[in-house]
Image (cartoon, rainbow, N blue to C red):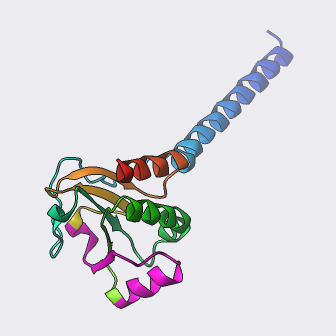
Amino acid sequence: MSAETWKTRLDVAVNVAVLCVCVLIAVIAVKKFLLNNPPSGLSIPKKGTHLSLSGVDWSRADRTLVMGLSTQCHFCSESTDFYQRLLKAATASKVPVVAVFPQPTAEAQEYWEAHALASNGVDLEQSPLDRISVSATPTLIVVDRKGLIAGAWVGKLAASGEAEVIKQIQD
């Protein structure tokens, strides 16, 4: 084979390799940034496990929405339009809402009001989030009247995830 043939084959091989690397990077980017999967290493509260939060009586309603949030969380702030809709759905369905923040209650109240979130009937609690099985914010948990987790969602949700949470509240 001539040197020219080798050069052509090498050019083709390099182009194919570059194309494969670009496709791999695109797949990783889509999985990391566009799909509604929590980042690896984070745990989602497990359905059917008991959630313990002092001062909350789960038996007062068929289900209760627990929101694990932080005043420092940009995903929480970016999700406030969804939370406004979610709180309206919870109020309409008579589902109690407990918003749990690791920050002091006064700071949480200020954050809540600054983001125009409905405060009627919402119980703002201060607690380390790991006590309620929350490893990342935002985390939304629906708890049944026995205190068992009926559903949980972590992170900023896509439209399909938002619809799933609202459906869980309205059922």
Residue 108 in the image: above or below residue 3: below
Question: Quadrant where the N terminus lies?
Answer: top right
Quarter residue 61 falls in: bottom left
Decide which of 148, 27 is in the foreground and name it: 148
Decide which of 5, 87 is in the foreground and name it: 87
Q: Decide if residue 122 is on the left or right side of residue 157.
A: left
Q: Decide if residue 32 is on the left or right side of residue 169.
A: right
Q: Position of residue 13 (x, y in %)?
A: 71, 24
Determine the residue positioned at 40% across, 74% down: 70
Residue 38 in the image: above or below residue 52: above
Query: Is residue 39 in sight in this rendering?
Result: no
Q: Is 130 included in the stretch rendered in magenta? A: yes
Read off the magenta span: 106-131
Determine the residue positioned at 43% across, 59% down: 89
Most distant residue in the top direction: 1
Quarter residue 55 falls in: bottom left
Query: Is residue 103 in sight in this rendering?
Result: yes
Q: Position of residue 136 (x, y in %)?
A: 36, 63
Determine the residue positioned at 33% across, 86% down: 105
Q: Decide if residue 4 is on the left or right side of residue 129.
A: right
Q: Position of residue 119 (x, y in %)?
A: 41, 78
Determine the residue positioned at 18% across, 65% down: 60
Q: Is 91 included in the stretch rendered in magenta? A: no
